[in-house]
Image (cartoon, grey):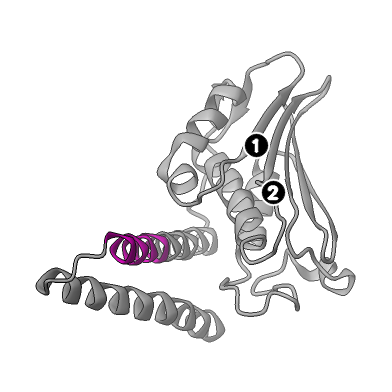
Amino acid sequence: MDVKFVNILSHELRSPLTTVQTSAEILDHLLSSDIVDTSIMKKHARQIMDEVADMAQLLEKVLVMSRLENTQTGFSPTIADPVTFLEEVLDRPFVCGRYSQKVDFGIKGEHRPALIDPFMLTHIVNGLLDNAFKYSRNKENTVAPRLRLSFEASHWRIMVRDTGIGIKSADKTRLFRSFSRGSNVGHIQGTGLGLEIIKYFVRCHKGAIQLKSIEGKGTVVVVDLPY
């Protein structure tokens, strides 16, 4: 495995593991003492769950990258209803159990079935929504990310819009490359692998992905897929 990737992985795991250990020690202290402060306990329990979710997502990316390198990730499409599929994705703990805000989900056009790979499409949607939440988390006056599903004549479209920190113009051309991240992300964790994997999965569906963003205003990602 690439040395640079191992270094990034080690760095990305160290911070959440430290947080989990600290929160667990605080919970242990509270449970073994006469102090019962449910608000503090809930806070640290939530921190543990959030950090575990981050690590689970990171390890999933490692698994996906390993499969890509060994050409073992085959495209396995099945006929499905995109509306039902996305509703099921939004009901899963990764999305609905991780963030206090709910995704603003809307549908446009007449429903049509499509050929989709469940594993790949789940990763596409989860990855885009996680980015939308993550890069809006510490920004004031943000609204819940919008997920729009629209049925066009020749294709169907997934659009994710957020009001987060946005992306600098100089960074946009390299965001789909391995280990590339925006220069304005600060201390927000990430490996720079998410968009590369998403783009690969979109191409497996013979689709296209576009990203539009204004620094300080937010980002819109559009994925067009054939039926």
Question: Disc 1 on helix, strand or loop?
Answer: strand
Q: Tag on residue 104? A: 1
Residue 192: name its quadrant.
bottom right
- Quick check: 206 above or below 36? above
Magenta range is 38-52
Name the chief secondary structure element in magenta.
helix
The one nearer the camera, 135 or 28, is: 28
Q: Position of residue 11 (x, y in %)?
A: 48, 83
Badge 1: how crowded within 10 Å, few (<14), some, or many (20+)?
few
Question: Disc 2 on helix, strand or loop?
Answer: loop
Q: Position of residue 221 (x, y in %)?
A: 76, 49
- Quick check: 134 above or below 146? below
Residue 15 in the magenta stretch? The answer is no
Left/right placement of residue 55 relative to residue 200 reads left
Residue 146: name its quadrant.
top right
Choose the circle earlier in sequence order: 2 or 1.
Answer: 1
Q: Position of residue 98 (x, y in %)?
A: 46, 51
Residue 135: name its quadrant.
bottom right
Q: Amino acid at mark 1?
A: Asp
Residue that numbered label 2 is attached to: 143
Left/right placement of residue 145 relative to residue 208 reads left
Left/right placement of residue 39 relative to residue 7 reads left
